[in-house]
Image: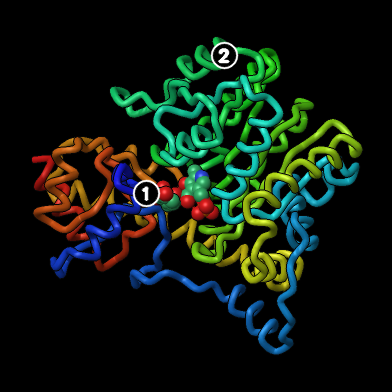
Amino acid sequence: LFSSVEMAPRDPILGLNEQYAADTNPQKVNLGVGVYFDDNGKLPLLQCVQAAEKAMMDKPTPRGYLPIDGIAAYDNAVKALVFGADSEVVASGRVATVQAVGGTGGLKIGADFLKRLNPQAKVLISDPSWENHRAIFQNAGFEVASYRYYDAANRAIDFDGMIADLNAAAAGTVVVLHACCHNPTGYDISAAQWDKVIEVVKAKNLVAFLDMAYQGFGHGIAEDGAVIGKFIAAGLNIFVSTSFSKSFSLYGERVGALSVVATDKEEASRVLSQLKVVIRTNYSNPPTHGGAVVAAVLNNPELRALWEKELGEMRVRIKEMRQKLVDGLKAAGVKQDMGFITTQIGMFSYSGLSKDQMVRLRSEFGVYGTDTGRMCVAALNSKNIEHVCASIAKVVA
Ligand code: PLP
Ligand code: TYF
């Protein structure tokens, strides 16, 4: 039965984790996968999560099946977070939100629904993008191409190229956009540039699919979420996937969501019914724990304030590490100006290092980033930064 099964390529990012785990270098540093670690190099378990879990333990509940679209209090909390507590779209009932198995699950539900809705559509992702964007939409049956985004020569965004590519797309094309903290480059477009993107999406009848995997890691929860409001103000029907993996440090609980903004309440209820078909035929209904924790935090003013404080601390620490990286590289003798690292935002830095240099970083110094030169600055800390700076200085010399 399986004699003709070919070996599938491993995920380039998750594969690095295995290589890192097997490395015996005592100074090894994992800047590969996008995970936030605290200054002690530990994966945080947020206080707000612990408090919510303690309350749940004190009053244990049985674990029946959840509704297909998940915990209602969770879906409502996601709506308030993504669109604003007083937003017209939520109040009028024209948003369909479903709990999803991580942000990945949100993307997958959206992709499957879009394929049923418009099987001929093409999908555009940024060049470069999170590799799973391509894989998810291809596996849903779409042809996936890319729009220009990163300008390596100038260490900037090729915004003219991006707009030209969106302008050239056929009506109905699904455009996957990183709502904030672009993965992998760390370069976000400005508010004014978002306005231009929205203008083209509207004029060309494109379908915007906003991937919000890092809300709160850029400039703040509301600041990072503002882009969603711009699409709403333009009167567009949009898709938004949400991930709490990073913002709640709940990676393994797989907590996410998909929200679809319809034209009115009646349309939203038909959309919701179709999202439920997709979910039912994939995994029936979502798991309970992660969604219950996030709902408990978001719906309790005290815990919510604690979450915002803890998320703010993660955001600030990453920014400090960016500055320490720039300073440390200079002190280690790197001649070129690395100041661009502090203009990048979110968990990643596209370092501009070549594949050969990234391979040397790994094999000679135990410093793991992706072959594309991406480094997770959220994994730097006061103990490993010196080694990272010294190692980079040696490979760029
Ligand atoms: N989208 C982007 C851009 C990501 O970087 C990630 C990272 O994990 C995801 C989606 C998926 O998030 P999750 O782990 O919640 O599935
Ligand atoms: O880009 C990253 O590192 C994160 C984590 O298949 C990740 O988004 C990477 C690969 C993958 C799933 C999650």
Query: Residue 56 versus residue 311: which sits nearer the camera?
Result: 56
- x 56%, y 60%: residue: 254
- In the image, residue 162 lies at what x, y percent? 49, 19
SS at mark 1 in the image: loop
Give the residue at mark 1: 1
- x 45%, y 41%: residue: 132
Query: Residue 70 versus residue 213: which sits nearer the camera?
Result: 70
- In the image, residue 325 lies at what x, y percent? 28, 51
Q: Earlier in the sequence, mark 1 or mark 2?
A: 1
Circle 2: residue type: Ala
Say whether marks 1 and 2 touch (CB < 8 Å): no
Give the residue at mark 2: 169
Q: What is the distance, in whole Å, between disc 1 and disc 2 at their CAs?
A: 42 Å
SS at mark 2 in the image: loop
Q: Which of the 4 image quarters holds residue 341? A: top left
Is 68 left or right of 328, judged from the image as shown? right
- In the image, residue 383 lies at what x, y percent? 25, 68
- In the image, residue 20 lies at what x, y percent? 23, 60
Q: Between label 1 and label 2, give the one nearer the viewer.
A: 1
